[in-house]
């Protein structure tokens, strides 16, 4: 409940900051209240207790988009990401985020509530960063909203708000591009594509080991959280803080022990410094390439056409 209230307050503050001064005060408050209700009922629901790191790999393994050649998905995702980062208008990254998110949910069969729960964590960082970008220190009142702080003023300016909105849209579009790739393509397929373009083997090995040890760290944290809950360590706020400190204190040591056990298991199975994955041959279909090319072309026109 507390998490849902915090999400509602963050959505209200963000909507109010983006619309204050450009809309009448009553309309801005109504829009902020609507955003708070949506965040309260969707983003704050469920949390991340059962939607962890492992869910990405499980959803990618089961995704119907797994039939598409991974090279096409990588090029489409990274091309969209670069175009979102270079956009001078907020519409191309918004369009890319909606399209790629829609493909992930519709074609990739990722439940909408699960997808929104995945978006919640990066959205919180991006939203707080956007709020900070709106305000600037000035020696005199010079913005849409001015807050006195002793000899200086904390002012929300129109230029700062425009930069914050553009940064917010770019970042959310980029997150949608990366989620499209990670929720439809298992890591071994990505590594196999990187091998074909001669990425150094040591980089690929580190990539896979870090990815695997993220699972170990997550599993260890979940196991310790469950142990704390079984011992009534999730009651009052003070007890929750104490439980979190104890879990964090033992998490590193437990994860190191799990990693050492995993390394010994790899060596006992003949690990010699190179990973070999069984790969299913997936043909490059013309229609998949055409759809990816059309999507990148449409996004590129949206990015570069306003500048001309």
Image: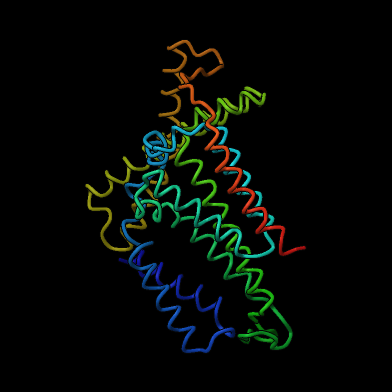
The quadrant of the image that shows the C terminus is bottom right
Q: Nearer the viewer, residue 121 or 93?
A: 93
Residue 100 at x, y percent in the picture: 50, 50
Q: Nearer the viewer, residue 100 or 261?
A: 100
Colour basis = rainbow
Residue 19 at x, y percent in the picture: 55, 79
Residue 33 at x, y percent in the picture: 40, 78
Residue 57 at x, y percent in the picture: 41, 36
Where on the picture, by quarter, is residue 293? top right
4 relative to 292, above or below: below
Which residue: 55% across, 59% down?
95
Q: Nearer the viewer, residue 97 or 45?
A: 97
88 relative to 249, above or below: below
Which residue: 42% across, 44% down?
249
Query: How many numbered discs?
Result: 0
Which residue: 46% across, 89% down?
26
Q: Nearer the viewer, residue 107 or 124?
A: 107
Where on the picture, by quarter, is residue 216? top left
The quadrant of the image that shows the N terminus is bottom left
Residue occupying the far right of the picture: 308
14 relative to 196, above or below: below
Which residue: 55% across, 77% down?
17
């Amino acid at each position: 409940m507390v998490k849902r209230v915090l999400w509602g307050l963050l959505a209200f503050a963000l909507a109010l900051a983006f619309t204050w001064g450009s809309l009448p005060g009553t309309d801005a408050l109504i829009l902020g209240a609507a955003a708070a209700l949506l965040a309260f009922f969707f983003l704050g629901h469920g949390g991340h207790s059962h939607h962890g790191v492992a869910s990405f790999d499980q959803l990618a393994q089961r995704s119907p988009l797994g039939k598409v050649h991974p090279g096409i998905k990588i090029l489409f995702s990274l091309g969209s990401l670069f175009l979102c980062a270079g956009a001078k208008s907020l519409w191309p990254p918004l369009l890319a985020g909606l399209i790629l998110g829609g493909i992930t949910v519709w074609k990739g069969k990722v439940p909408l509530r699960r997808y929104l729960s995945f978006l919640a964590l990066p959205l919180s960082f991006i939203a707080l960063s956007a709020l900070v970008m709106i305000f600037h220190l000035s020696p005199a009142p010079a913005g849409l909203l001015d807050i006195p702080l002793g000899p200086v003023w904390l002012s929300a300016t129109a230029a700062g708000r425009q930069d914050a909105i553009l940064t917010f849209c770019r970042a959310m579009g980029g997150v949608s591009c990366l989620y499209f790739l990670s929720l439809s393509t298992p890591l071994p397929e990505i590594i196999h594509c990187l091998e074909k373009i001669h990425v150094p083997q040591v980089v690929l090995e580190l990539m896979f080991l870090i990815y695997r040890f993220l699972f170990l760290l997550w599993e260890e944290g979940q196991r310790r959280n469950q142990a704390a809950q079984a011992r009534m360590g999730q009651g009052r706020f003070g007890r929750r803080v104490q439980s979190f400190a104890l879990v964090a204190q033992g998490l590193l040591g437990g994860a190191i022990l799990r990693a050492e056990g995993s390394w010994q298991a790899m060596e006992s199975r003949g690990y010699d410094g190179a990973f070999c994955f069984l790969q299913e041959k997936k043909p490059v279909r013309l229609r998949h390439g055409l759809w990816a090319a059309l999507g990148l072309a449409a996004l590129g026109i949206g990015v570069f056409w306003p500048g001309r």
